[in-house]
Amino acid sequence: MYNSIIVRYLVKLWDFFSGYYEKSFVKKATDAKLGFLRYIFKGSVVKDVFTSDKSLIDFSFFYKIYSWLVDIINKILKIINLSFKRLEVSSIFFSLISGFNKSFNKVIDKTNIKEILLDSIIFKFIISLFSADEVGDQWW
């Protein structure tokens, strides 16, 4: 299964010990302790702060105010967007501008963006950082 004899034996050794660990007293004691801790910390804000994937900023009062303000601004912008869409039907000037924007997007879609990126100096630099050098002996 593995090309290396050492790796093969280490994997067999790991499988051997992990099988016995599943049935061991140590695992049962650890699971009991973890179950007790889960019961104690059920609904705890302190546990949520320390075990959550969120940062401490997400739990702060200022962040909650900031996210509330951003939600309100998003709702206002959606209402403005709907009003502009209603204007597009009745306004000649607005319909001309939106028609120009749609035609501009079609021109962008027709150009080959891949060629533009591949000719970019910044893109070439980033690709060169991750490309492997072919210099030297290959040990494998």
Image: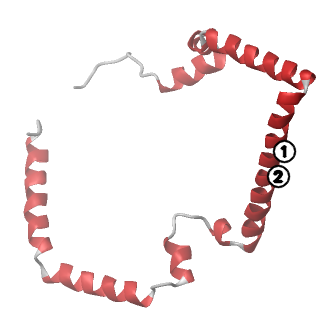
In the rendering, at what x and y percent does residue 73 appear?
81, 54
Question: Mark 1 belongs to which amino acid?
Answer: Ile
Which residue is denoted by mark 1 in the rendering?
80
Q: Nearer the viewer, residue 38 or 90?
A: 90
Q: Residue at x 12, y 53 (%)?
A: 10
Q: Quadrant of the N terminus?
A: top left
User: Do tag 2 and tag 1 residues touch (Cβ < 8 Å)?
Assistant: yes
Image height of 110 relative to 122, above or below: above
In the rendering, at what x and y percent does residue 117 appear?
61, 16
Image height of 106 relative to 83, above or below: above
Residue 76: mark: 2
* Total marks in image: 2
In the rendering, at what x and y percent does residue 105 appear?
71, 18
Which residue is most to the front?
Answer: 90
Label 2: element kind: helix
Q: Quadrant of the C terminus?
A: top left
Q: Label 2 vs label 1: CA separation? A: 6 Å
Q: Residue at x 57, y 64 (%)?
A: 54
Q: Quadrant of residue 87?
A: top right
